[in-house]
Amino acid sequence: MRSFLIGLVTGALAVAVVVVVAAPGLMLREQASPFGLNETVAAITNKVVAGGWVVSSVMPLDESVKKHGGDAGRPVRLINICQARHASAILQDDRARVASVLMPCTIAVYETAGGVKIGSMNAGLMGRFFGGTIARIMAGPVASEQAAFLDLSR
């Protein structure tokens, strides 16, 4: 019995360590852009609109941080996007409304020492964590449409 308990605790600790180390890399995605900052923002926003979504804003986060006394370093643009049918499906379900904290979907475009990068949430994985309506919408159409928006190779 003692060996079983030691094994159980050791296994649980190992799983916890793996989750803590791997989770951030699974939840958030980063990819290099083949374009400059403004060209990347334009390419993504054009694909978003062509895909039937709305670009509610493109926010210069670095400028907002600077305006309020901080320093974000290099430029950062937040592209806030929404698709009314997907949002409606989640907002009409009282148990799923908590996902409104993730609305609108945000895509970040930012400069790094290594070039322009695109940051996004892994909508498919996030959706599966919640289950129900959130999983059906986020892990389904939101994830596939987001992938198309971020594929700048075509």
Image (cartoon, rainbow, N blue to C red):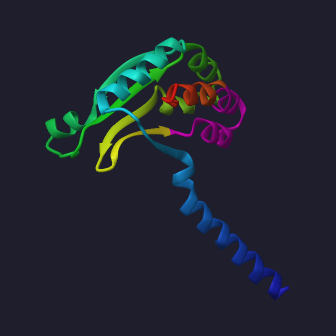
Q: Nearer the viewer, residue 113 or 85?
A: 113
How many discs mark residues in the rendered view? 0
Magenta-highlighted stretch: main secondary structure?
helix
Q: Work out whether residue 100 or residue 123 is closer to the camera in this orientation and state it.
A: 123
Horizontal side of residue 129 vs 29, given as left or right: right
- Name the quadrant containing residue 68: top left
Looking at the image, residue 100 lies above or below residue 84: below
Q: Residue furthest bottom?
A: 2
- Residue pictured at 59% horizontal, 68% vertical: 17
Where is residue 94 shown, x and y percent of the image?
Answer: 63, 25
Q: Would you say residue 65 sits in the magenta stretch?
A: no
Side (left or right) of 106 relative to 2: left
What percent of the width, then of the height, locates residue 105?
48, 28
From this view, report whether residue 25 is shown above or below residue 118: below
| x and y, in percent, of residue 37 in the image | 31, 32
**Looking at the image, which residue sits at the far right?**
1
Residue at (81% x, 87% y) in the render: 2
Q: Which residues fall within the magenta stretch?
A: 121-140
- Res. 85 image quadrant: top right
Q: Is residue 102 left or right of residue 55?
A: right
Vertical order, 84 against 107 (above or below): above
User: Where does residue 40 sit, x and y in percent of width and height?
Assistant: 37, 28
Examine the rendered structure and indicate whether residue 22 appears above or below residue 78.
below
Give the left or right position of residue 58, taking residue 9 as reference.
left
Image quarter of the N terminus: bottom right
User: In the depicted view, which residue is nearer to us: 77 or 96?
Assistant: 77
Q: Give the residue at x 41% y 22%.
A: 43
